[in-house]
Image (cartoon, rainbow, N blue to C red):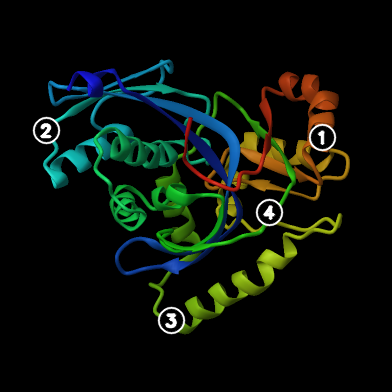
Amino acid sequence: MQDLAKEKIIVKSPAKINLHLEVIGKREDGYHELAMIMQNIDLSDYLEFEINNDGLINLESDCNFLSLSGDNLIIKSANLLKKILNIESGANIFLKKNIPIGAGLAGGSSNAAATLMGLNKLWKLNLEQKSLCSFASSLGSDVPFFIEGGIQLCFGRGEILEKLYSKFEYGVLLLKNPDISVSTADTYKKYSNRFCDKYLTSTELIFLTRKDVRENVLNRLNFNNQHTTIKNDLQLIVENENDSVKQALYLLSNLKNPLTFAMSGSGPTCFALFKDIDTAKRELKANYKLFKDQGYDAWVCNLLEKGITFI
């Protein structure tokens, strides 16, 4: 046990953006039937795991605004493994937080997946990817995506995944007002009230929408230096209610030659894609003061081919 006690595992836990988010309709189970393309970006949190012998899950973080109690997805993930697999060991976990909270970048879901993978290694559980995805699905709709990550089609409520092997090399410029966050649950509820007056019953509509995303939407993401529009149905709600999102999209639309721009997830983070990382960096440098003066934090990121990784 002494050797185990000294072991430290460090996991990189990246954010995601939505390259497509379509709400097909509301299901009878209360969830929404979705058709999405999710893509990992190199804006990442880091989690450190050390085993302890008192059987407790202890979470600390450098983020003062984050709950470290049982409602945190890191704690939920660890307790889920302990309960179902009857694990006696505990873990000390430290979270270095870089992904903004409530930003539409799924930082919490990424942390949950990172916890499953980190503790799988720390506790030597030898769980295969299929089992990890099953645990992830019970924690949240976005969590399974991060187990493998990269770029994937995400259907159902987000748990039906189809791995893609497109290696886009676009540069991403992100904008977010640090004082603004958006509730995903509230946004979906508002979308339902406005657009989903009946429960979704058409399996043919689901089939055809998935087929269109596979065959057409992905092809449109090969921009060939031509501007195109990214579909995000939730943007219809948030942009009209949130001046921060409306202003961010306006700022991004006025940059030089963005290939596209949109809100990510339920917002309020917005992003623009450029032909490469150097072009995105030039745009950030040229507009950094403007972004700050308007109240926005800004980042430039690469797209990632994988999700959670060990350092």
One can see residue 72 in this view: no
Q: CA distance from mark 2 to mark 1?
A: 49 Å
Q: Which mark is residue 203?
A: 3
Q: Which mark is residue 88?
A: 2
Q: Earlier in the sequence, mark 3 or mark 2?
A: 2
Local crowd at mark 2 within 10 Å, few (<14), some, or many (≥20)? few
Q: Is residue 16 left or right of residue 157?
A: right
Q: CA distance from mark 1 to mark 4?
A: 17 Å
Q: Residue at x 36, y 54 (%)?
A: 129
* Spot occupied by residue 144 in the image (x, y as percentages of width and height): 40, 52
Q: Residue at x 41, y 15 (%)?
A: 64
Q: Residue at x 11, y 42 (%)?
A: 86
Secondary structure state at the residue bearing disc 3: helix
Q: Is residue 298 left or right of residue 309?
A: right
Q: Amino acid at mark 3?
A: Thr
Contact between labelled residues 1 and 2, with CB atoms less than 8 Å apart = no
The quadrant in which the N terminus is found is top left
Q: Which mark is residue 278?
A: 1
Q: Nearer the viewer, mark 3 or mark 1?
A: 1
Q: Amino acid at mark 2?
A: Glu
Q: Which mark is residue 167?
A: 4
